[in-house]
Amino acid sequence: MTEQTVPERWWDKADEDPTHVAAVDWFARLQDPQVSLDDTLAWQEWMHEDSKHAQAFARIEELSQILPRLRLPPRQASWWLARDCYDASVPLSAWRPPARPKLAFMIAASVVLAAVALAWAKWTAPAADVLTTTIGENRTVTLRDGSRITLGGATRVEVALSGNVRTIELAQGEAFFAVAKDPLRPFKVHVGGANVVAVGTEFNVRRSSDHVMVAVTEGRVIVEPASGILPVALLREFKPKLTPVRVDAGEQTTAGSAGIEEATPVEDATAATSWQTGRLAFRLQPLRYVLEDVNRYAPKPIVLGDDSIGDLVITGTVTGGNVAGWVGSLERAFALEAVNEPERILIRRR
């Protein structure tokens, strides 16, 4: 009878492999709500250094998703556990007697769960304070930590401050954030499919139906996928638009279903915040997105009678007190017709 050898699996000696050990460390650090901007940037550099780094990180994330679905082995009696003589002097993979494959898999991977558990144990979920504005209303609120949030018209923000992290949910609308510096408590704005992470900076976030625009006026932020960790399949391909993006002062980015765009310089430094003084500024924006912003200040909602009209590219400004005049300019510039109905203004082609 020929003796069969069991092929070596990657997790058999993962605890001896520096790449996998580093991947576990990065995984745990990125799960921590206190992760810093510098750590996030360092993780990106590490991922780009070697394709094996991305592969190892993908394996650790995949492992963390599989483990909760495994059935735990039967609970053993105390006398049986007393026979356990493992003293951690050698890696688990080198210890004898060998465990069953399924149990060995779970033991070799337990370091992942332990690291993640320690990271998440620091997290507490405080009750959120809800801040809202009505159509046409701008409002500035100072938070307990000294940060200020200026809400645009028809905006909803949920604020949760804890000892570990400052979490903001921008449910709808637009807001400008002046963040009080606190290196031990990152300031995270969750909006759509993205997170904007800051420590002490000033930036503007505008949420539309299917994308988010982030412009930084002071300091820097990191815009990352909302999960914080890329899906395994995407990590294997490592698509650039689905990785975190650094945005410095004077730059902006857009995040949507296709991913996060690279940061680009802002053409007009005042445009991102001009809405605070009653002036909405747009540059080469599709009309459908422009209307989403204008409707937060319009007396009556403006709707499109034809979806194709939404593709018209708009550059210009709209003042909150003269929306009707702006609609008239649309009619003349694009051969459109604005029908003033009792509950809305309908834009259609002539």
Image (tube, rainbow, N blue to C red):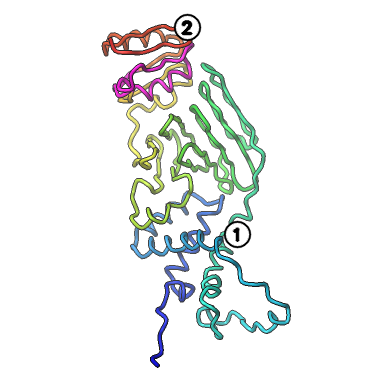
**What segment carries the magenta color?**
287-316
Residue 128 spot, x, y in % from top left: 64, 36
Q: Seen in the image, is 39 located left or right of residue 242?
A: right
Which residue is most to the bottom?
A: 1
Q: Which residue is mark 1?
A: 117
Quarter of the figure with the C terminus: top left
State the separation of the CA atoms marked 1 and 2: 57 Å
Task: Tell me: residue 189, above or below residue 56.
Answer: above
Task: Tell me: residue 241, above or below residue 205.
Answer: below
Q: Amino acid at mark 2?
A: Pro
Give the residue at x 43% y 42%.
Answer: 223
Give the residue at x 46% y 32%.
Answer: 205
Residue 84 spot, x, y in % from top left: 65, 82
Residue 258 spot, x, y in % from top left: 35, 41
Task: Tell me: residue 9, above or below residue 252.
Answer: below
Give the residue at x 43% y 30%.
Answer: 209
